[in-house]
Amino acid sequence: MSTNRRSFIKKSIIGAGLLTGANFMGNDVFAHENMAKSSKINLSDEDIILFQGDSITDVGRDRNNRNPNDTGALGHGYALLAASQLLNKYPEKKLKIHNTGISGNRVPDLQKRWEEDTLAFKPTILSILIGVNDFWRTIDRGAKTTVEEYKTQYQQLLQNTMQKLPDVKLIIGEPFAVKGVGHITEAWYPKFLAYQDAARDVAKEFNAILLPYQKVFDNAQKSAPGAYWAADGVHPTLAGAQMMASAWMECIK
């Protein structure tokens, strides 16, 4: 997911229909998924919530704008939609919500900018969605990253995080792909499944809430074709972004 795809991502999100409700996937998905941490996150007053990841999180945000709760700084994807729901539902809590996802990132890219783009914000709730590029680059650019390296680097990242922010509450998004749509060919399988397994293992190890996005997108295809939710198989449409935001909100109580 290179930076020059940001225009496509923005257009695909703006051009798709808005899903309202998303009741068909919310509780059902979580009821059937073994989350690493069964309890949901209780919001506290003045919580600092940070969304981190690649282009699925970035979605055209203004990277020079580091202000909380700012539309431009939050991008045009699920992070913005989840933030708007949080701010609307809990005005009395005075939440501060940031997005520092960057298009094209893999775990080693996060490691390089972790101090400035994560730890410096001192988040009390940290939501991470990373992994699709760690695999994708092995398909389209000949990268040599193995699933073992992905998992080890992810573990190192979170070990560093817990040392600096021992009380932070973690949400780990499962990397996902819509099979048969756009970029997602048979060449992805079964190797990509191992990266999803690794993300689930990391969530369990660090007592994080696992957000089962693959299950969310699989279930959504009972109502509409895969391209309706992710135009190229990876980047969500507006309907897909709203669905992701609804799933994210299921982690909060």
Image (cartoon, rainbow, N blue to C red):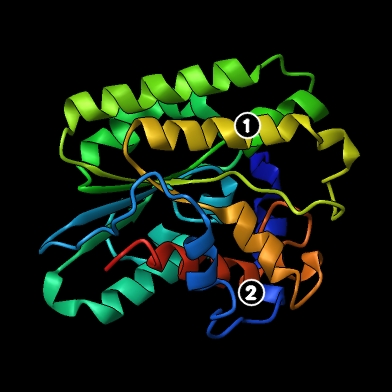
Q: Is residue 112 visible?
A: no
Q: Would you say the residues marked 1 and 2 are in contact, meaning their CB atoms lie under 8 Å apart?
A: no
Residue denoted by label 1 = 195
Q: Nearer the viewer, residue 131 or 174?
A: 174
Q: Quadrant of residue 4?
A: top right
Q: Residue, x 82% and y 46% (percent of image)?
A: 184
Question: Which numbered disc, 1 or 2, marks the residue that appears first in the sequence?
Answer: 1
- Residue 251 visible: yes
Residue 215 percent location from the top left of the image: 62, 57
Q: Which residue is mark 2?
A: 239
Which one is in front, 196 or 137? 196
- Which residue does the image show at 56% across and 85% down from the upper left? 20
Q: Residue furthest bottom?
A: 20
Left or right? Give the position of 236 relative to 116.
right
Badge 1: residue crowd in 10 Å (few <14, some 14–19, many ≥20): many
Residue 154 placed where, x, y %?
45, 25
In three-dimensional space, the C-alpha distance between marks 1 and 2, rounded to whole angstroms, equals 25 Å
Q: Is residue 35 left or right of residue 18?
A: left
Which residue is located at x 23 percent, y 29 percent?
A: 162
Q: Residue at x 55, y 30 (%)?
A: 198
Vertical side of 75 occupied by 55: above or below: above
Tell which tag, 1 or 2, sits nearer the viewer: 1
Say which element carries label 2: helix
The picture places residue 131, in percent across and down from the top left corner, at 58, 35
Q: Foreground residue, 152 or 241?
A: 152
Could you tell me the amino acid type at mark 2? Ala
Side of 202 where 186 appears, left or right? right
Mark 1: amino acid: Tyr
Quarter holding the N terminus is top right
Rendering quarter of residue 82: bottom left
Q: Element type at marker 1?
A: helix
Relative to 65, 185 lies left or right: right
